[in-house]
Amino acid sequence: NRKIWTISISGVFILISVIILLKPARLFSGFESAWNDIEVFQENPDTHTSLGARLVMWRNSVLIFKESPFLGTGTGDFRNDSRRLLEKGVSHNNQFAVNQSNAHNLYFQLLAEGGLVGLFLMILTLFIIPFRYLYRLWQNIENHRLHCFALSGLIGIMAFVWFGVSESWVNRNPIMTTYCMTVLVFLSSAVNAQNNNVTCNDEYS
């Protein structure tokens, strides 16, 4: 297990290093743009920037959550709730942000529309249950096919977990379908590899 973790971490480090070496200008320009957006937001939160609009939406999500912390305000109400906050004078007057139908962050979106209950149930269903199952399959290092499929599924889940930081993809059917298909393909492949291995062992025993 230690050897596998070492190889995996080394692979990620090498991949990041290659990206930095091949695309340094694009990478650092993204950081510079984000820093400029933060500075603009600090000077005037009403000015529209990509990151500034997200900060307004995330702030509004917390304000909406505080109004109904356990069950949220219901799915599909984010735009109306944001406009209501603007009318009450508690939201920044960023017209782009208050007219968005989602918070551009999966976790803030679930917190605002579903409250603590909705956030917990969605994360449990989407991430924790499939991750734990795939992780148990991944620990079987003797079956290389099973190990590979399970690891691919784990990487896929972690990628969508990170994607949720900047996009509320549960509201977008194509992305939601892609996630479900990704998990199901690797999960079914891992289970199939496990069953084939059991069958082979039974035949040779």
Image (cartoon, rainbow, N blue to C red):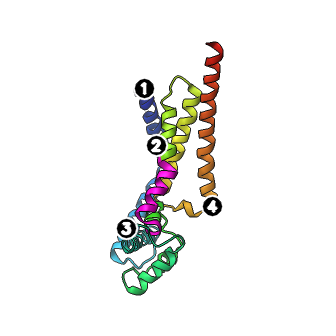
Give whichever of discs 1 and 2 has the lower sequence position: 1
Q: Which mark is residue 38?
A: 3
Which residue is found at the position 42% from the left and 58% from the top? 31
Q: What secondary structure prevails in the magenta region? A: helix
| Cα gap from disc 1 to disc 2, whole angstroms | 20 Å
Q: Residue 108: give x, y in percent of width and height.
A: 43, 64
Which residue is found at the position 41% from the left and 73% from the top? 64
Range of residues picked out in magenta: 112-128
Q: Which mark is residue 3?
A: 1
Query: Dot 4: within a 10 Å radius of its alpha carbon, few (fewer than 14), some, or many (20 or more) residues?
Result: few
Q: Quadrant of the C terminus?
A: top right
Residue kind at label 2, given as amino acid type: Ile
Which residue is found at the position 47% from the left and 75% from the top? 97
Give whichever of discs 3 and 4 has the lower sequence position: 3
Question: Of 189 and 92, which appears nearest the observer?
Answer: 189
Residue kind at label 4, given as amino acid type: Asn
Q: Residue 81: give x, y in percent of width and height.
A: 46, 78
Q: Which mark is residue 16?
A: 2
Give whichever of discs 2 and 3 has the lower sequence position: 2
Q: Which mark is residue 173?
A: 4
Q: Secondary structure at mark 2?
A: helix
Viewer-nearest of labels 3 and 4?
A: 4
| Cα gap from disc 3 to disc 4, whole angstroms | 31 Å
Give whichever of discs 4 and 2 has the lower sequence position: 2
Question: Of 16 and 23, which appears nearest the observer?
Answer: 16
| Cα gap from disc 4 to disc 2, whole angstroms | 30 Å
Q: Secondary structure at mark 4?
A: helix
Image-based side of 70 in relation to 131, left or right: left
Query: Dot 3: within a 10 Å radius of its alpha carbon, few (fewer than 14), some, or many (20 or more) residues?
Result: some
Residue kind at label 3, given as amino acid type: Ile
| Cα gap from disc 1 to disc 4, whole angstroms | 39 Å
